[in-house]
Amino acid sequence: MRALGDYGSVQVCFVGSGDAFGSGGRYQTCIRVTSGDQVVLVDCGATSLAALRSQGIEPQSVDAVALTHLHGDHFGGLPFLILDGQFSRRNRPLRVYGPPGTRERLTDAMETLFPGSSEVSRRFAVPVVELEPGGSADLGQLRLRCWQVIHASGAPALAVRVEDGTSSFAYSGDTEWTPALVQVADGASLFAVEAYTFEKPVRYHLDYRTLEAQRPDLTAARTVLTHMSADMLGHLPEAEFPAAHDGLVLDL
């Protein structure tokens, strides 16, 4: 294990570590990744604004949001984050990165939740960059890379990796097992991976037993479980991987 002084400059905070249904009283997926003065959210589930505020994190500190897929528990908080910026008089861009279809889905969500909100003139821009699987984007101090995984959401679902050249955070998103996860986790400082159930197969999701069987191929320095159902939460004492929880902060 590395000494504290050997860690890089990336910090990861699991603002929300829960599934779509709030199992265990957890907030939906929202992971804050910081490097220097840059703040990126990896996913922004519908409960994210409340989760950020409950942990004393200023929503307007967020520079960019990287979405793994377009289900409400992973992107449904984005309209609220944008509207909060509008009413808080935000004056710098909020950049959004996601799979193909993100721009249209975001517009539709804003119009469904707050009619007319997608066309309002704001003090800040919300540029949307749609990333094809295998693509990458420079976020400033951080770089975003993505791989396609297996999860039906009306658009390609992605696993992502955020890195600063020294440290890297990898995240599976929601997916059933796919060899792409081996590439995502390869050499990562931290790999956060879905363990939705303990051993029951659920289509488009990953169970712990399947993940455990693939452990020899996962070469991340550290692996933590996230996006767990009540079933998986009840089996945590049997899991060898540690589990994330809301508010968990890890320095990479």
Image (cartoon, rainbow, N blue to C red):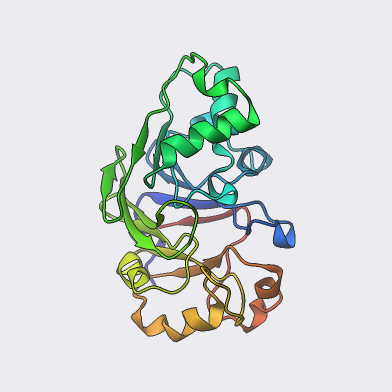
Q: Which corner quadrant of the image does residue 197 belong to? A: bottom right
| Residue 42 visible to an observer of this rendering | yes
Q: x and y percent of residue 190 in the render?
A: 41, 63
Asked if residue 248 is positioned above or below residue 181 in the image, the reply reads above
Between 230 and 17, the residue placed more toward the observer is 230
Asked if residue 80 is positioned above or below residue 239 in the image, the reply reads above
Q: Which quadrant: the C terminus?
A: bottom left
* Residue under the image location 33 percent in, 69 percent down: 180
Q: x and y percent of residue 127 in the render?
A: 38, 29
Q: Which corner quadrant of the image does residue 171 belong to? A: bottom left
Q: x and y percent of residue 128 in the render?
A: 38, 34
**How many numbered marks are there?**
0
* Residue under the image location 51 percent in, 68 percent down: 204
Between 122 and 35, the residue placed more toward the observer is 122
Asked if residue 86 is positioned above or below residue 98 in the image, the reply reads above
Asked if residue 207 is positioned above or below residue 48 in the image, the reply reads below
Between 7 and 11, the residue placed more toward the observer is 11
Q: Residue furthest front?
A: 154
In the picture, measured across the screen, residue 138 lies left or right of residue 226, that is: left
| Residue 220 visible to an observer of this rendering | no
Q: x and y percent of residue 245 in the render?
A: 62, 60
Between 120 and 42, the residue placed more toward the observer is 120
* Residue under the image location 37 percent in, 45 percent down: 100
Q: Which corner quadrant of the image does residue 170 belong to? A: bottom left
Q: Which quadrant: the N terminus?
A: bottom left
